[in-house]
């Protein structure tokens, strides 16, 4: 075992060896092979290339060097192309702070049977008058950045549960294809996390409609890990035992305190008042939609070709992309 594996339990070390093909004898060589590919993408600023950082990308792609580098390149390119999203990416940012305090995301204290961290989102908590969808995405990305520092989670991964109870048609109508694709690109294609399952519970019919729209942009592996439980919480409990779930999800624990994870990140700043207007956020929805047409969302791209995620030229598809997924008219 090398110093890079020092944070792993014996069980997780074995899991990394069997499932991820992680070999302590070749670990430094694996990392260097990924690092050597950086020269093929001079258009990207690789701001961090230390061993521990590259290792998380290898683990996320089961030590396939090429795929690990593809993910590393997309990680930095996503941030490079969405600079405003990553300005002031910290818990005290007003929009992020309000999203965190409303439980975006919630993080359960117990791991599941496979050692995965469980994230929960109670969709109806989204107060659209106080923060944007982009603020929620930024809060989730910030949270994942904090959690992925744990080598155990680099190997074991995460589970996401989204409870759509009381999420209104009006709230859903505010979502556009570009917003959802921005989230898919940031979480599925550009972040070194292993998601073992994404569970929808209590979803209304219009959430099924949203899923139909975004489904083409999901990788086959992602699609297979999305479970639509509806009101049948028993099917959720077959995969995640109720002993570790809050009562809102039919679990045996008390109701989830939405501020739990926010307090972890914010500490003493949790109770400080912050004035924030969603309209003041510099990455406007209009800009977001302008930059993300369907042409830019390729699910499989060569990492050695510069500019593979460049912004598309203006065109008719741009106008289509600015329409809400659901109309109240």
Image (spheres, helix red, strand yellow):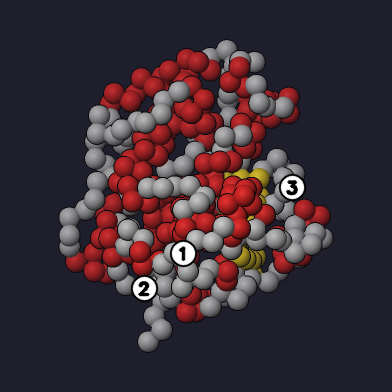
Across and down, in percent, residue 88 comes to: 41, 48
Q: Which part of the image, by quadrant, shows the C terminus?
A: bottom left
* Residue at figure coordinates x 64%, y 15% from the top left: 1
Q: Is residue 288 left or right of residue 98?
A: left
* Residue at figure coordinates x 33%, y 51% from the top left: 84
Instruction: Say which of 302 and 293 sits in front.
Output: 293
The answer to whether marks 1 and 3 mark residues whose Cβ atoms lie closer than 8 Å is no
| Residue annotated with mark 1 | 275
Q: Element under label 3?
A: loop
- How many residues crowd around disc 1 within 10 Å: few (fewer than 14), some, or many (20 or more)? few
Disc 3 and disc 2: Cα gap in Å?
37 Å
Q: Is residue 85 left or right of residue 197?
A: left
Across and down, in percent, residue 189 comes to: 42, 45
Q: Is residue 174 left or right of residue 155?
A: left
Of tags 2 and 1, the one toward the viewer is 1
Q: Is residue 229 left or right of residue 53?
A: right
Whichever of labels 1 and 3 marks the residue nearer the N terminus, that label is: 3
């Amino acid at each position: 075992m090398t110093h890079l594996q020092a944070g792993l339990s014996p069980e997780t070390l074995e899991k990394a060896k069997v499932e991820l093909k992680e070999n302590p004898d070749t670990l430094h060589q694996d990392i260097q092979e990924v690092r050597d590919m950086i020269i093929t993408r001079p258009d990207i600023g690789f701001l961090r290339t230390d061993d521990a950082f590259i290792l998380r990308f290898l683990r996320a792609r089961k030590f396939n060097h090429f795929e690990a580098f593809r993910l590393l390149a997309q990680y930095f390119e996503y941030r490079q192309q969405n600079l405003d999203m990553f300005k002031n990416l910290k818990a005290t940012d007003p929009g992020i702070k309000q999203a965190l305090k409303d439980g975006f995301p919630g993080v359960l204290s117990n791991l599941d049977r496979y050692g995965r961290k469980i994230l929960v989102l109670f969709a109806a908590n989204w107060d659209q008058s106080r923060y944007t969808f982009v603020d929620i995405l930024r809060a989730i990305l910030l949270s994942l950045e904090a959690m992925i520092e744990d080598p155990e989670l680099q190997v074991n991964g995460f589970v996401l549960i989204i409870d759509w109870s009381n999420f209104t048609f009006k709230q859903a109508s505010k979502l556009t294809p570009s917003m959802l694709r921005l989230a898919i690109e940031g979480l599925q294609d550009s972040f070194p996390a292993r998601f073992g399952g994404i569970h929808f519970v209590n979803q209304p019919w219009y959430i099924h409609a949203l899923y139909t729209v975004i489904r083409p942009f999901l990788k086959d592996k992602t699609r297979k890990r999305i479970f639509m439980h509806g009101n049948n919480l028993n099917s959720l409990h077959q995969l995640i035992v109720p002993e570790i779930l809050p009562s809102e999800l039919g679990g045996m624990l008390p109701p989830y305190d939405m501020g739990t994870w926010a307090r972890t990140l914010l500490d003493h700043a949790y109770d400080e008042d912050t004035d924030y207007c969603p309209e003041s956020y510099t990455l406007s929805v209009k800009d977001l939609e302008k930059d993300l047409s369907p042409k830019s969302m390729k699910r499989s791209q060569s990492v050695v070709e510069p500019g593979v995620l460049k912004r598309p030229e203006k065109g008719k598809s741009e106008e289509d992309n600015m329409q809400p997924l659901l109309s109240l008219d």
